[in-house]
Image (tube, rainbow, N blue to C red):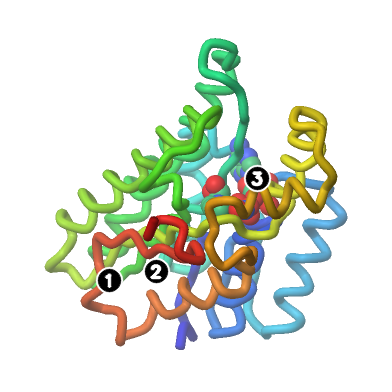
Amino acid sequence: MLANKTAVVTGSTSGIGLAIAKAMAREGANIVINGFGDAGAIEKERSGIEREFGVKCVYSGADMTKPDEISAMIADAEKEFGAVDVLVNNAGIQHVSPIDEFPVEKWDQIIAINLSSSFHTIRAALPGMKRKGWGRIINTASAHALVASPFKSAYVAAKHGIAGLTKTVALEVAQQKITVNAICPGYVWTPLVEAQIPDTMKARNMTEEQVKRDVLLAAQPTKEFVTVDQVAAMAIFLCSNAASSITGTMLQMDGGWTAQ
Ligand code: NAD
């Protein structure tokens, strides 16, 4: 479905982004992966995507807190592949703390990575999509784009910001065959979630199982984690012609969390 197209997926060295990058490659897209991590492990993923799916895959180490690096990543992708047809804004980090103890630099970092980077990527990629008369922008938001949880002020603020950005850009390009949507997962089993477990076990004096069931999945009625492959499948659907009337939406994949 995505043969001769190019997808840039931010934050795709791990978790949801990596699953989306692989799913897009499976559909025939050339891929730009991005994110941090061990250089050898990233190269293994990059070359693995090329080998497994027969597409081209390049790695950009652009730091999503740095606007210049972000615009260079999009420009390099356009130079390498001719266009950016699909842009997936997925990079994100978390920090959990009461707001009066929230480190100022963590607030700034979360707003930069989880919100402002999407402004910079969209700003850079949209002119190319308009020229081609086709594009798909998919933002990995969160249930936290729609509802809040305590101690996650920066994350919730950034994700609510992504909801507003998604709707605004969708309206701006509504007549140019470019759709802009946000996927809003509940808890997905990824390294980002796994990393929250030890601190929560300590803070609440709980076992790992208790943290999973009574804290992480407390608000998720299905009591099951969303999988990265389910999120990737939604991203693929949004790229299809069948989804061309879906724009400006927040697509909840949260096991019923936000129905409550
Ligand atoms: P993850 O930690 O597995 O992956 C995050 C990715 O972002 C990694 O590739 C990392 O290297 C990259 N990244 C971090 N800082 C960066 C920076 N400054 N520049 C470039 N890349 C950077 O996390 P994940 O769970 O796969 O999360 C991916 C997205 O999904 C995030 O936006 C997150 O908020 C969102 N999300 C996750 C869940 C969940 O339960 N895991 C739920 C809802 C939404």
Which sits in the foreground, 188 or 13?
188
Q: Regarding mark 2 in the picture, which secondary structure is present there?
A: loop
Q: What x and y, as percent, mark residue 193?
A: 69, 48
Q: Which residue is mark 1?
A: 132
Q: What x and y, as percent, mark residue 145?
A: 39, 46
Residue 179 seen anywhere in this rendered image of the structure? yes
The Cα–Cα distance between marks 1 and 2, rounded to whole angstroms, is: 8 Å
User: Comparing marks 3 and 2, which lies closer to the viewer?
Assistant: 3
**Disc 1, ligand 1: is the CB inside 8 Å?**
no
User: Comparing marks 1 and 3, which lies closer to the viewer?
Assistant: 3
Which sits in the foreground, 182 or 102?
102
The Cα–Cα distance between marks 1 and 3, rounded to whole angstroms, is: 46 Å
The first of marks 3 and 2 along the sequence is 2
Q: What x and y, as percent, mark residue 234?
A: 46, 74
Res. 61 image quadrant? top right
Q: Which residue is mark 3?
A: 215
Circles 1 and 3 in contact, beta carbons < 8 Å: no
